[in-house]
């Protein structure tokens, strides 16, 4: 019971189907194992019977000539008169008279235990005389016992294998469902987290404006705060919806040849932030297979995050042996060393002055959908040396 309590809910859900799969395999394999065991047992008994028949033939041949020795454990018996005579060496003392009477019945063979396991066979040679032979059946019984163990072990192993396959198969089948539930759960938590601050600002500004009569400038200031908060909330909702769509695999990539260097120039030209210079360094033509809209969103998100904390942002493209790289560098404070490995996670702060929000998480997801990677570093050991984000994509030859 303690072991069951230690399992996760998803694991407990898989226990009954796993046991059912093992039970079904056991029911299906049980009859097959029984048939296989019976065939093995029959083969062992036939081997013993064949040895007894060989002794009969040997005994009959010895009766016709003196040059052949009598086989072991063979007797000539007259059951009517109750006498018997051993025809060769004997290693046991069976009830030969009773065994000889089998020659006149429908079952002239039997297995018995007398100072060990034996197989006896009787064959009438005249109306009154019977040849009786006895064969040690230890090897036969050992073979039958081994067959029973082996078939039982094979059945249990295959049943266990069926249970394990069911366990891991159900885990893989349910993985997308669990992922979808996790995405929905995280989406709700992230939405609440991101919208709580702007909604609090809206509530506080509106309450402050309505608390008493104020001047037109004071009302305009409150409305400006409310407008800024609603814009932030709207932006957050848009990012949340976009991220949830990507995480759920609902985005369809439309690949086409794309000049990465021209895309970088286009993004640099489109971003206008007061006091910030955004420029693209001209370079060689770099062509990749990519979805234009999604990849442009990647470069735009990363560049805007850089512009929010720097005075100058520089975009460059490079062509390497198998990859194309886009590097977005800024002269800002750089990423905090403690979180530099987590800047592409949702709602992780990249520095002390701002937050990367969901833009960086969306960027990484899109790049990975293109078969690429995202990496965030600082220019040097000093965190004030500025941040550097590198997007690596496979290029079109």
Image (cartoon, grey):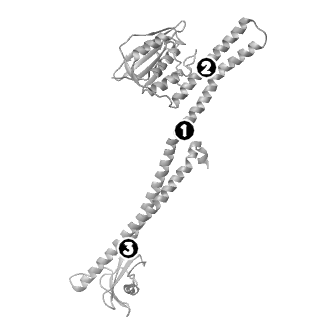
Q: Is residue 55 above or below residue 154?
A: below
Give the residue displayed 74% in from the left and 16% down from the top.
Answer: 207
Whether residue 88 sits left or right of residue 94 in the image: it is: left
- Using the image as rendered, state which of residue 154 and residue 378 is in the foreground: 154
Q: Which residue is mark 2?
A: 234
The spot of residue 249 in percent (x, y) is: 50, 31
- Res. 372 in view: yes
Q: Give the residue displayed 45% in from the left and 58% down from the top.
A: 155
- The local secondary structure at tag 2 comes to helix
- Per the model, the C-alpha gap separating discs 1 and 2 is 29 Å
Tell me what residue is drawn at x 49 percent, y 58 percent. Answer: 26
> Could you say which is closer to the camera, residue 160 or residue 75?
160
Q: Choose mark 3 or mark 2, whichever is in front.
A: 2
Which is more N-terminal, label 1 or label 3? Answer: 3
Give how far across and how far down residue 19 sits, in percent.
Answer: 54, 52
Q: Residues within 10 Å of mark 2 (few under 14, many from 20)?
A: some
Residue lying furthest right: 212
For the residues marked 3 and 2, what is the alpha-carbon distance in whole angstroms? 89 Å
Q: Which residue is mark 3?
A: 137
Q: Which mark is residue 177?
A: 1
Residue in the picture at 62% in, 20% down: 233
> Which mark is first along the chain, 2 or 3?
3
Q: Are marks 3 and 1 in contact (CB under 8 Å)?
A: no
Q: Pinpoint residue 323: horizontal percent, then vertical percent.
A: 37, 22
- Gap in Å between the C-alphas at discs 3 and 1? 60 Å
- Residue 379 visible in the current orientation: no
Which part of the image, by quadrant, shows the C terminus? Answer: top left
Q: Nearer the viewer, mark 3 or mark 1?
A: 1
Total marks shown come to 3
């Amino acid at each position: 019971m303690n072991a069951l309590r230690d399992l996760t809910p998803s694991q407990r859900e898989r226990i009954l189907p796993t046991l059912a799969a093992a039970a079904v395999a056991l029911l299906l394999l049980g009859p097959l194992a029984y048939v296989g065991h019976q065939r093995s047992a029959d083969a062992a008994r036939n081997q013993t019977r064949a040895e007894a028949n060989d002794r009969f033939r040997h005994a009959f041949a010895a009766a016709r000539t003196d040059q052949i020795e009598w086989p072991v454990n063979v007797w000539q018996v007259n059951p009517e008169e109750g006498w018997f005579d051993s025809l060769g060496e004997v290693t046991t003392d069976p009830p030969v008279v009773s065994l000889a009477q089998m020659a006149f019945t429908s079952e002239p063979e039997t297995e018995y235990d007398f100072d060990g396991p034996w197989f006896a066979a009787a064959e009438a040679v005249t109306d009154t005389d019977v040849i009786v032979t006895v064969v040690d059946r230890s090897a036969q019984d050992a073979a039958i016992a081994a067959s029973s163990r082996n078939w039982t072990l094979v059945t249990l192993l295959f049943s266990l294998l069926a249970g394990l396959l069911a366990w891991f198969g159900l885990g893989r089948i349910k993985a997308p469902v669990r992922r979808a539930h996790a995405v929905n759960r995280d989406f709700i938590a992230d939405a609440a987290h991101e919208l709580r601050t702007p909604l609090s600002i809206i509530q506080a500004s509106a309450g402050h404006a309505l608390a008493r009569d104020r001047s037109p400038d004071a009302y305009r200031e409150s409305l400006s705060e409310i407008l800024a908060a609603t814009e932030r909330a709207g932006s957050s909702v848009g990012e949340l919806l976009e991220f949830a769509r990507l995480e759920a695999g609902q985005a369809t990539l439309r690949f086409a040849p794309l000049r990465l260097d021209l895309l970088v120039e286009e993004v640099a030209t489109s971003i206008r932030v007061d006091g910030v210079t955004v420029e693209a360094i001209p370079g060689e033509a770099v062509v990749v297979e990519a979805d234009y809209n999604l990849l442009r969103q990647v470069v735009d998100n990363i560049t805007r995050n850089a512009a929010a904390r720097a005075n100058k942002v520089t975009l460059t493209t490079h062509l390497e042996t198998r990859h194309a790289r886009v590097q977005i560098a800024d002269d800002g404070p750089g990423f905090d060393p403690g979180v530099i490995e987590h800047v592409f996670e949702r709602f992780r702060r990249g520095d002390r002055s701002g937050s990367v929000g969901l833009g960086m998480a969306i960027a990484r997801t899109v790049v990975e959908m293109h078969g690429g990677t995202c990496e965030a570093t600082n220019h040097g050991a000093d965190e004030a040396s500025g941040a550097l984000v590198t997007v690596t994509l496979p290029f079109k030859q």
